[in-house]
Amino acid sequence: RAIGRGDLVLIKGSRAVKLDDVVSRITRRK
C-alpha cells in the first residue's frame, strides 16, 4: 500500500476498513 491517506483513515475507525477495501480493489486493477 503506497497510500498514506489509508493510514490516517485507519485511525478514524471502522470506516477505514471500507476505504481500505476500496483502495485494495483499485490497486489490484493496476
Image (cartoon, rainbow, N blue to C red):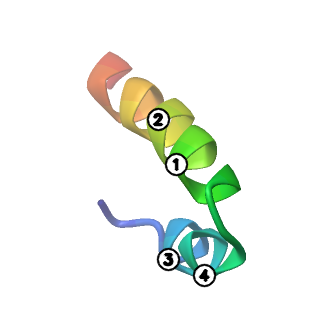
Work out whether mark 1 precedes mark 3 in sequence or the reverse, and give the earlier one: 3
- Dot 2 crowding, Cα within 10 Å, few <14, some 14–19, many 20+: few
Q: Disc 3 marks which residue?
A: 7
Report how far apart the C-alphas of labels 2 and 4 lie in the structure: 15 Å
Report how far apart the C-alphas of labels 2 and 3 lie in the structure: 13 Å
Q: Nearer the viewer, mark 4 or mark 3?
A: 4
From the viewer's perspective, is residue 11 above or below residue 10? below
Amino acid type, mark 3: Asp
Q: Disc 1 marks which residue?
A: 17
Total numbered circles:
4
- Describe the element under mark 3 as helix, strand or loop: helix
Left or right of 1, for residue 5:
right
Q: Are marks 4 and 3 in contact (CB under 8 Å)?
A: yes
- Describe the element under mark 1 as helix, strand or loop: helix
Report how far apart the C-alphas of labels 1 and 3 lie in the structure: 10 Å
Q: Disc 2 marks which residue?
A: 21
Amino acid type, mark 4: Ile
Amino acid type, mark 1: Val
- Describe the element under mark 4 as helix, strand or loop: helix
- Dot 3 crowding, Cα within 10 Å, few <14, some 14–19, many 20+: few
Residue at (32% x, 25% y) in the render: 30
Q: Are marks 1 and 4 in contact (CB under 8 Å)?
A: no
- Describe the element under mark 2 as helix, strand or loop: helix
Report how far apart the C-alphas of labels 1 and 4 lie in the structure: 10 Å
Q: Are marks 2 and 3 in contact (CB under 8 Å)?
A: no
Q: Nearer the viewer, mark 2 or mark 4?
A: 4
Q: Are marks 2 and 1 in contact (CB under 8 Å)?
A: yes
Q: Disc 4 marks which residue?
A: 11
Q: Are marks 1 and 3 in contact (CB under 8 Å)?
A: no
Work out whether mark 2 precedes mark 3 in sequence or the reverse, and give the earlier one: 3
Q: Position of residue 4 (x, y in %)?
A: 50, 77
